[in-house]
Image: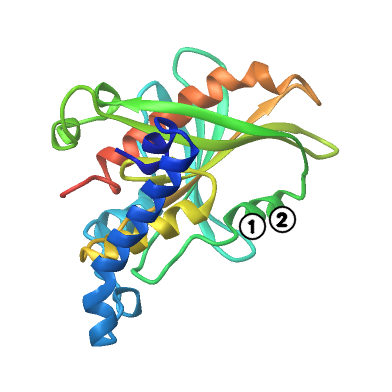
Amino acid sequence: MPLHKVLKQYPPLPQVLLLLFGLVLVGVGAMPSYISGKWPWMAPPDLKTLKELKELQKSGLTLPGWKTLRDRPMPTGGHTWWRQDLKKEDGSTQAMLLLLAQTGPMKQPQVEWMDINGYWRWTVDSMRKSRFIVETGDIQGDEAGKKGDASFSARVEARFFRGWTGKQTYAVLQWYAFPDGGHSAPSRWFASDRISQLRGDRVPWVAASIIMPMEPLGDLEKMRPEAESLAKSVQAALMAGPLKINP
């Protein structure tokens, strides 16, 4: 069970004790590396899905219920994202999906959101959180079975805001996708990846940004259902592909 779920079940003092206990476990796991002077992150383990992550940067994702109108690399100030222009098959809703995958063992999430903001030169307002859950049944292929029983769920906390320029207003939803969920803060990946490296494993990541045109300076909440529905499909497709566990 994730640490934040465990902490919610206990009052403040036991929470502190649980946190200290967790730090002790990490320290014990790190002891062999401390003695040898060879820390895992100095020569991190390989990414098990490196091939799939690199392929993602060339072909993107196939998403149920959405048609890709056009896809191509999109260079920005510091990165080259993969851009997919999407249209919902049963309606007129359009969206842009930007993906940036971890394509090497030393590549870390850093300033991806600033990168996007600088490229679009939009004004950001109405910043808030978006939380959604991907259930086992949402995951494509046989990946659901690999992740456990029918009660498996991956929780994602993204940032959701309105970005506008003099010509257009957008609803924007952004997060880093991991094999078991996702979060908009790169610090969540750093902590999880360091612990995984102590076990000789890695936590791959993919930065995802959904951009949907909306009414000029319109109500952002009206865009939430459609944006979160698409984000849920993106997370599920990533978990079934380049972020799959035990490939």
Query: Quadrant location of residue 171?
Result: top right
Q: SS of the residue at dot 2? A: helix
User: What is the number of the mark on residue 115?
Assistant: 1
User: What is the number of the mark on residue 203?
Assistant: none
Instruction: Name the spot of residue 6 as percent of width and height, x first.
Output: 36, 36
| Vertical position of residue 106 compared to residue 224: above or below | below
The residue carrying pointer 1 sits among few (fewer than 14), some (14 to 19) or many (20 or more) residues within 10 Å by Cα, namely: some
- The amino acid marked with disc number 2 is Gly
Residue 16 in sight from this viewpoint: yes
User: What is the number of the mark on residue 118?
Assistant: 2
Q: CA distance from mark 2 to mark 1?
A: 5 Å
| Vertical position of residue 61 compared to residue 216: above or below | below
Instruction: Name the spot of residue 118 as percent of width and height, x first.
Output: 71, 55
Instruction: Name the spot of residue 213 as percent of width and height, x first.
Output: 67, 28
- Identified at 39% across, 72% down, the residue is 106
- Identified at 71% across, 49% down, the residue is 120
